Image (tube, rainbow, N blue to C red):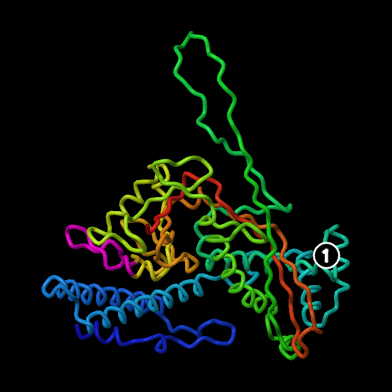
Amino acid sequence: MTQHSTFASKSAADLPLENKAGRAGPEPAGAVKAAFDEFAHAFEAFKAANDTRLGQIEGRLSADVLSEEKLARIDAALDSARTRLDRISLDRARPPLGREAPRDAAAEEHKAAFDLYVRAGESGGLKGLEAKALSAGSGPDGGYLVPETIEREVLKRLADLSPIRAIASVRQISGGQYKRAVATGAPATGWVAETAPRPQTDGPVLSELNFPAMELYAMPAATQTLLDDAVVDIDAWLADEVETAFSEQEGTAFVSGNGLSRPRGFLSYDTVANASWVPGKIGLVGTGAAGAFPGASPADVLFDLVYALKAGYRQNAGFVMNRRTQSAIRKFKDADGNYLWQPPLAADRAATLLGFPVTEAEAMPDVGAGSLSIAFGDFRRGYLVVDRTGLRVLRDPYSAKPYVLFYTTKRVGGGVQDFSAIKLLKFA
């Protein structure tokens, strides 16, 4: 217990300080193992403190205030340990920018021209390259395309940082929108004998789903001194600056976006009780308690949510919720006293709930009256993210002198593509 108490006393202030670029300083050898061990110890401390709290509730009908405070501190430390573990794992897994494959002559020429544009504002080289490539929409108003190595690295980092993008299907497009036809009714099928006539079937009923690519922008700033420093890797600097802004905006839009000038989030679609589900709407399961889990057997609604999904989707399904909802669920046990929420088995794995992975998305709403705070489904089949190829940068040395602004834009869309694949838990 002494070891657990020592861990619980740690706070966010004990974590490594981050540098100006948002990255932690160099991690010592074995940092991943140390962070994973720290996370495992935190969860053991959490279980011990929660068991004590539950014992007090059973014996005295209420928990001791100090036990509640201790449990809250350990819970916060558990979240901090998980955040540190995720950051270290991502940093170690990220390859050096632009070293995935050798560049060809055209790519080298584009990179050199782009580097000159960013550092000195000389755009003649990029104009010539985009004129040769017949690129549309370039120039001072639309900006210039970044080299493919930067675009590829930004998209890879977004896949690591944007929680919904990491579990959804992602498709690249070259136009302004992506359309696909889906069947809204069951196919006309039947059994026939070997020599029996084949009756004509009704034609399928189809509808069109449209996923427009909306414009997302970030505007990192740099001093001219930084740009003049030849040692500074401009490609890495730009990717570092835009990744957080893009991932935060995407994370919110993919969950709750209204589809107007941004992707449409899965929580913005019409919902219906799962027993009355129809195509085009997302089925939901109610908790039976306004703004809370049921007082008796609160975990039962999680089982109801899991089995609201058809078996074919459950094989690759997972939960999506924010950290505060996850914190409440960590206290749940089954009839045998086992915790339903379990920590990851390895540093690069997700925590599990009822055996299904848990994706932490801060854009999900907190538990409240009528809130849709937990989603469960096969998001690879259920949600589609579309990226229009091309990341553009427009250099602006005038608006915020002495800083140079880089208006960076990408076009991205998203929406539900299979309404059978996602179910929601409503706290009502």
Residue at coordinates 60% horizontally, 34% vertically from top-left?
206
> Which quadrant holds the N terminus?
bottom left
Quadrant of residue 42 within the rendered picture: bottom left
Residue at coordinates 76% horizontally, 69% vertically from top-left?
108
Q: Is residue 173 left or right of residue 187?
A: right
> Which quadrant holds the C terminus?
bottom left
Disc 1 secondary structure class: loop
Dominant SS type (magenta): loop
Residue at coordinates 45% horizontally, 42% vertically from top-left?
277
Q: Is residue 77 left or right of residue 195?
A: left
Amino acid type indicated by mark 1: Ser
* Residue 373 point in image, percent of width and height: 42, 61
Q: Is residue 288 left or right of residue 199?
A: left
Residue at coordinates 44% horizontally, 59% vertically from top-left?
372
> Which residue reaches farthest left?
59
Q: Residues within 10 Å of mark 1 (few under 14, many from 20)?
A: some
Above or below — where is 392 with respect to 232? above
* Residue 387 point in image, percent of width and height: 65, 57
Q: Is residue 289 left or right of residue 142?
A: left
Number of dots carrying numbers: 1
Residue 189 within the magenta-colored segment of the rendering:
no
Residue 338 within the magenta-colored segment of the rendering:
yes
* Residue 168 point in image, percent of width and height: 52, 55
Q: Which residues are magenta?
A: 328-343
* Residue 146 point in image, percent of width and height: 74, 68
> Which residue in the structure is indicated by mark 1?
138
